[in-house]
Image (cartoon, rainbow, N blue to C red):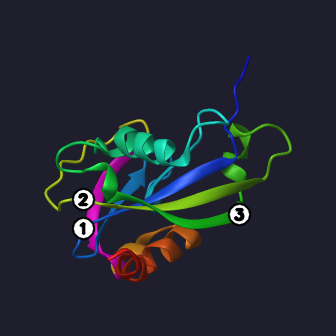
Amino acid sequence: MRSFKIPESVLVVIHTAELEVLLIERADRAGFWQSVTGSKDHLEEPLPTVAAREVAEETGIVVGSPRVPHGALVDWQHTIDYEIYPVWRHRYAPGVVRNTEHWFGLTVPRDCEITLAPREHTAHVWLPYQDAAARCFSRSNAEAILQLPHRLRATA
């Protein structure tokens, strides 16, 4: 039996206090740079758990570790609904064409070691937030990154 992705996901903007943003390049689409994203594994999975799990799976960064405490992961309380790119619709149940995405920010030290999941991502880069936004293939991901200075002021 084939299992389909749940059309509810997180986007996690990983950044430093100095507004450098980590981007990762998709393994299945060269040149497609993005923040960490991922879907719920089951309907009841709490969104902060999804965010922490996806960050660990895609970058090796462990939320709750001594260098990245739980408080470093912030739910931005922002949700968007978007059309799933046709190239990825086969991952969802037939007829599912929209996804609900919840935005999070994660502040990490700049020297945080990054360990990519090679089946998902092939490269990573740290960029000033404006440059990171310009490199994203997804307009909504770029928008999330551009909100970073406002988000940090709001939680300070």
Q: Which residue is mark 1?
A: 16
Residue 48 in percent (x, y) is at 48, 48
Nearest to the observer: residue 145 or residue 76: 76
Counting residues from the start of the chain, the first of labels 1 and 2 encountered is: 1
User: Quick check: is 122 in the magenta stretch?
Assistant: yes
Q: Residue furthest top?
A: 1
Q: Which residue is mark 3?
A: 82
Q: Which residue is painted at 51% across and 57% down in the image?
A: 11
Which element type, helix, strand or loop, lies under badge 1? Answer: loop
Counting residues from the start of the chain, the first of labels 3 and 1 encountered is: 1
Residue type marked 2: Val
Residue type marked 1: Thr
Where is the N terminus found, in terms of image quarters? top right
Give, as a single range, the part of the protein colored magenta. 121-130
Nearest-to-viewer mark from 3 and 2: 2
Q: Which residue is painted at 39% across and 55% down in the image?
A: 25
- Please say if 54 is above or below 124: above
Q: Which residue is mark 2?
A: 108
Q: Which residue is painted at 67% across and 36% down in the image?
A: 43
Nearest to the observer: residue 117 or residue 107: 107
Task: Tell me whether circle 3 and circle 1 mark residues in contact (CB < 8 Å).
Answer: no
Residue neighbourhood size for the residue with mark 1, other residues' Cα within 10 Å, grouped as few (<14), some (14–19), many (≥20)? some
Q: Quadrant of residue 84?
A: bottom right
Main secondary structure found in the magenta portion: strand
- Please say if 86 is above or below 61: below
In whole angstroms, how far apart are the C-alphas of marks 3 and 2? 28 Å
